[in-house]
Amino acid sequence: MDAFGMGLVAAIGALATVAGASEDIESDIGSQSNPNSQVQLAAQVGNPHRIYNKAIAGEPPSNALWCTTAAIMAYMLIEAFKTPALFAIVAGASLAALFVGVMATSAYFGRSASQARFNQWIYLDIVRYTTPSIMAHVWITSFCITTIAYLQVYVLTPHHPFPIPVIALIWGLTVGAIGSSVGDIHYGGEREFQWRLFGQGLNTMLSGQIVRKAEAGLRNSIDNAWFCAKFGGPATGMGFGLTVFLDSWRTTVFDPITQAPYAIAMGLFFIITMNLYNLYMEISTRRKYGPYPGYKGDISA
Amino acid sequence: MNFDINTLVYILEITVGGLLVGIGVHFVPVGGAPAAMAQATGIGTGTVQLAAGSGLTGLLSAGLMMSVTDNIWLIIATGAVGAMIMIDATMLTGSWIYAYAVGAPFASAKVNYDPFTGFSQPPYIGPGTVGQGIPTVCYISGTIGAAMGGIGGAMIYYPLVQVNNNPAMSAVFAIGIFLVSAVLASWNIQGTIEGFHDPKFKKWPGAFKACAVASIILAIVAVIITPIGGV
């Protein structure tokens, strides 16, 4: 263990936290998250809307694609042209953002046009001012993940044996999986889906009944980002940051060549702690919220 | 290439790895889009995506370990721990949102009492939903599933590196074999599962057979093709 290595692991954890947060907010702006099933259904049950809808792929594969695109360009510039790393990563992230701009626009047009028979319109103003925010968030995500991959391969000891694009592929897949597991729940609690009492899930009968109006005017995807940036995005960042940080920390503190069993034992300690924390949360929510009032079964709470 | 006893051992290791991934996916509590709306118990995403996210994080850890040691037990253990850390961090932060943003108690719709804590479940299930959140039994089941995925990923990766000495190519092959097993298993699951206490879990022999056939074919191809077509 050395101070430089620990500083690098801290930097990697911080970058991962930012990447997780921006990934989740990006998917909420584009409504690529799981609750988009309701948005997709909305026009069919008579609620045409102004939500940006680019859900043509799950979050993990699409983020893997964007991060790998950025990483391949950065890798090529670093290895073949000896470009400075920062410049190469910035160029890669910009390329990924441009790719996403094309895909998001075509996805929005395709998704909305396919619902023309349900009176769903294509709003050009939505395309004009929502697409750049999606691209900006993708730029942040792919920049952070390519930087993490660069640090793991070239700077942190022991150097990772995989090349930058493979690491970016795996971290991109992981950040998408965490974003779609964690951040989506908060997007699902957004006002768009609030035809329900607080403290319970959406009743299945109300599928597709999304909220389309704000205090003034019609709601759009930027309103969703405003809400999700408060908790869903940061929580996703924490999830991805914990994953990357704890996993790198244990192999930096304990030298994998001589102290590998300690690194594994430390990982097991983290796992047991997280299991106990979840148990604490389960007990605490049961005590604070109590059973649902309408329950008529035989099993006592 | 020399076709000796080692080649058979490599093929066997890759096959076992593929099977572990296929079975491990059944343990991961995924509720899909309904879970993201707090309509169903589990993690609000797809089976393959979560299994791949955790298993491949384990693969990254295993790859790092394999660059410094040849001890297969350390490599497998590191892969399992890496995968478990990823899924536990994901479920933990997801639980924060269920507990503090959605404001719902955790409840499973598939059992009346949690087998680990003994807590009653039906009174805590929201009206019109099939449970919400990640109760202890689902959390532990998910941790076991991630461990199996991580071990499986490491067991696929280890022999491939022995064959071709190229970590990058082996990793890409391992990701491919991993995803094949995960997708086959998720067809068997048909969308959502809560973990080993879910009645759907009893369907695992179907996935076992499918993954066995797919893994053997892929293992033979992976072991034979890399020395011929590789670097």
Image (spheres, rainbow, N blue to C red):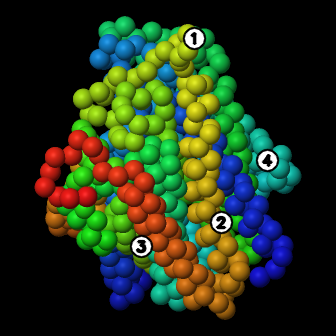
Q: Residue at x 61, y 55 (%)?
A: A238
Q: Residue at x 46, y 51 (%)?
A: B99
Residues B97 and A222: in front is B97
User: Residue B37: x and y, percent?
Assistant: 38, 39
Query: Amino acid under label 2?
Result: Phe
Q: CA distance from mark 4 to mark 1?
A: 44 Å
Q: Chain of mark 1?
A: A
Q: Residue at x 44, y 60 (%)?
A: A284
Query: Amino acid under label 4?
Result: Ala
Q: CA distance from mark 3 to mark 1?
A: 50 Å
Marks 1/2 in contact by CB < 8 Å: the verdict is: no
Q: Chain of mark 3?
A: B
Q: Chain of mark 4?
A: A
Q: Secondary structure at mark 3?
A: helix
Looking at the rendered structure, whether the residues under marks 2 and 4 are on a common chain is answered as: yes
Q: Which residue is under mark 1?
A: A216
Q: Which residue is under mark 3?
A: B147
